[in-house]
Amino acid sequence: MPCMTGEPRRERACRRVDSRGFTLIELTVVLAVIVTLALILTPSITNFITDSRVARTRSDTQTVAAAIVQFYKDNGFFPQWSLASNGGPGTAQNKVDLLVSEGNVPVVASPNTWTTGMSDPLEDQLVNNAPNYTMRTATANFGWNGPYVSTDIGADAWNNRYAVNVGLIDVTQGTKDGSGATKNAVWVLSSGPNGQIETAYQQAITAAVLGGDDIAVRVQ
């Protein structure tokens, strides 16, 4: 029977019924729905975040690769030295194995040149001209004409550094170097989501492959 005004006892009973709140069964059903939705949505959200990080990192590697190629077009040589020699390419003792960005040093399956080689900051080569290469002028055909990237080169999306095995670049024509050996692949590389470099440092350009979930762009 519906509640009627003018009946004090029935009004009190109605108030007791109307103010009782959720029952334990109702709360259990609500919580079960919330947990189910969380279980359904969490993998999708996680995948979206991972995909976004991969896309950002891939874009970064492409930007750095393009900057290195433009550096070569402007200077006539690649950024392989920590110190220029009379404004031009450095000498053998100043040649580096790696150009690296800011960020943590990635894990490797076993120590190799990706983490132990002589390195120089990417920013010094592409943003600041720290080696002191000759600057390009209106009357000079070649010269440093940076900065080659618009912002400082930070870590990848997982806070690990980018690395370029730039010491392996060889500008001779074809797939062979000056001694007749097959050239090695050169990568702008991120260790990817797992933070471990799984790509071999030295690989012939005719058979080079990325390892694991590494993200990279080939320069050579």
Image: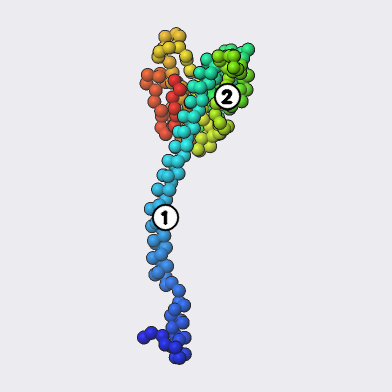
Residue at position x 46%, y 25% in the image = 187
Indicate the position of residue 23 as horizontal and vertical percent values.
Answer: 42, 72
Residue sitting farthest toward the front? 138
Sequence-earlier tag: 1 or 2 = 1
Residue 140 vs 22, above or below: the answer is above
Where does the C terminus fall, quadrant-wise? top left
Report whether 46 appears left or right of 150.
left
Residue in view at x 41 percent, y 29 percent: 211
The image's mark for residue 146 is: 2
Indicate the position of residue 146 as horizontal and vertical percent values: 57, 24
Q: Is residue 200 visible?
A: no
Q: Position of residue 142 (x, y in %)?
A: 56, 15
Residue 58 in view, yes or no = yes
Distance from label 1 to label 2 (Cα)? 49 Å
Residue position for label 1: 38
Residue 25 relative to residue 138: left or right? left
Question: Considering the numbered disc 2 on the image, is that residue within a helix, a strand or a loop?
Answer: loop
Outermost residue on the top side: it is 179
Of the residues shown, which amino acid type is indicated by label 1? Ala
Residue type of the residue flagged with mark 2? Gly
The quarter holding residue 204 reads top left
Tag 1 secondary structure: helix
Label 2 neighbourhood size at 10 Å, few (<14), some (14-19), many (20+)?
some
Residue at position x 60%, y 17% in the image:
137
Name the residue: 44% across, 85% down: 13
